[in-house]
Image (cartoon, grey):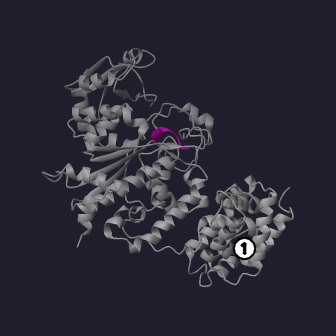
Amino acid sequence: MTTLRDAAMNSKAWPFEEARRVLKRYEKAPPKKGYVLFETGYGPSGLPHIGTFGEVQRTTMIRRAFEIISDIPTRLFCFSDDVDGMRKVPDNVPQQEMLRENLQRPLTSVPDPFGEYESFGHHNNAMLRRFLDTFGFEYEFISATEFYKSGQFDDTLRLAAERYEAIMEIMLASLREERQQTYSCFLPIHPETGRVLYVPMKHVDKVNHTITFDDETGREWTLPVTGGNVKLQWKPDFGARWAALDVDFEMYGKDHSTNTPIYDGICEVLGGRKPEHFTYELFLDEQGQKISKSKGNGLTIDEWLTYAATESLGYFMYQKPKTAKRLWWDVIPKAVDEYHQQLNAFPAQAVDQQLANPVWHIHNGKPPASDMVVSFAMLLNLASVAGAKDKAGLWGFIRNYAPDASPEKNPQLDQAAEFAVRYFNDFVAPGRVFRLPSDKERAAMEDLVARLKIWEGGLDAEALQTMVFAVGTAHQFEPLRDWFTALYEVLLGASQGPRFGGFIALYGVGETVTLIERALAGEFVA
């Protein structure tokens, strides 16, 4: 009999493939630190977004997969680069003038425009933690401010001073000639203004671990690289952090991929071992453009969760992370229904199939049962024809179709019904375009009405589907898909829809007859 660990060691599911790469790092000896460290990074210049969710969830999936194939303990650090200087004022926060006065100061030195926290960085860090806690992620939060000021980073910073030339050699090779003239991997924090300075170094003292530079006014300063007086530029900071923490795994978006040799090289110069990395493809908007926080294109977490449950977003994140994905409103219904299809398949699957099932990774090996006796796509079409203003308007039809179902017994379905009404009203209703049938289509629909009026097969969705097929065949639709397209466009105002037999079973035979007769009378055409 195949054990869970045996199956995991051979699984082609990408979280297990990544987990095996991490395990291979320690095939000769376990980590000296006593655990395997997974890390995700966060730039707290703005609120957490869907990419933040994706990074933490996908990393968690790999971490849980690793825990199946190894007994080495694991930890996940969520690192906030809150020493970063505020380069621009976000558009969506109050006190714009006050923030402008604090440009280039570390985010944890900028006053909180909301007046709730010690600083703007602390505010955004709190938002990140609340965000991660909402989804139940297990992680340890690290603030770069604390990391720099507490001395945890001091040994690595001293080493960076001692190996300054080696770090600069890596960095300068990646820069244009003009940038090379002023670049330094060290960014001093001005002792008086508190601003992060982008100035060239006059001298780096490898013995005393200090840097000497001129500020913008020409005054010369000498500061120790330790104790939070200096921060590293973000690319060197990435690699230095890996070395200081002994990170074993970190994933990031494709836009970072060209920097990977830089991160790795600096990590190794500073005495570290480069971690395993995983580069994921980016999310695209409706037009196929990369999603950007500043542009506001694509979907936010809150927008997705307005129309579907968290698990459907987890399912979307699991799918082909190395393939660019359109993240737009129309992917939500598909993600919901495919997630529940996988839930339904899970109990009957062999262990190797279960490990390849996305729901294993979404629910850490313990997926719940699905109570969705009606698909989300079908609920959307039901909302369309029923004119439902709330989920209660759908439940009468659902109970006729599935008498044992109820909001109490089927909480997932109850929640989905509420989401479906909201989604229909916001996205489907405004875009519906009804048309009148052609003569051939009208004759077929009149035939369908006649057959439904004498139907004695009950609410058997398959039998109804077979009958609808028979009508299309009898009226010589070629291809038969044209018949179903006509039904959708004339009755639902859409170019595609559900299995029509299932729709009739849910909506009701008599109700479907009335719907078709109203459409044939032209009631739906403006």
Task: Label 1, secondary structure: give it.
Answer: helix
Q: Position of residue 288 (x, y in %)?
A: 56, 40
The residue tagged 1 is 393
Q: Nearer the viewer, residue 247 or 2?
A: 2
Residue 13 visible from this viewpoint: yes
Query: The N terminus lies in which quarter of the figure?
Result: bottom left
Determine which quarter of the picture holds residue 296.
top right
**In percent of the image, x 69 and y 55: which residue is there?**
495
Q: Position of residue 386 (x, y in %)?
A: 75, 70
212 shown above or below 450? above
Residue 62 visible from this viewpoint: no
Magenta-drawn stretch contains 360: no
Q: Nearer the viewer, residue 504 or 215?
A: 504
Write the start and end of the magenta stretch as one range. Answer: 107-112
Q: Position of residue 461 (x, y in %)?
A: 62, 75
In the visual, does 4 lie left or right of 426? left
298 shown above or below 488? above
Query: The C terminus lies in which quarter of the figure?
Result: bottom right
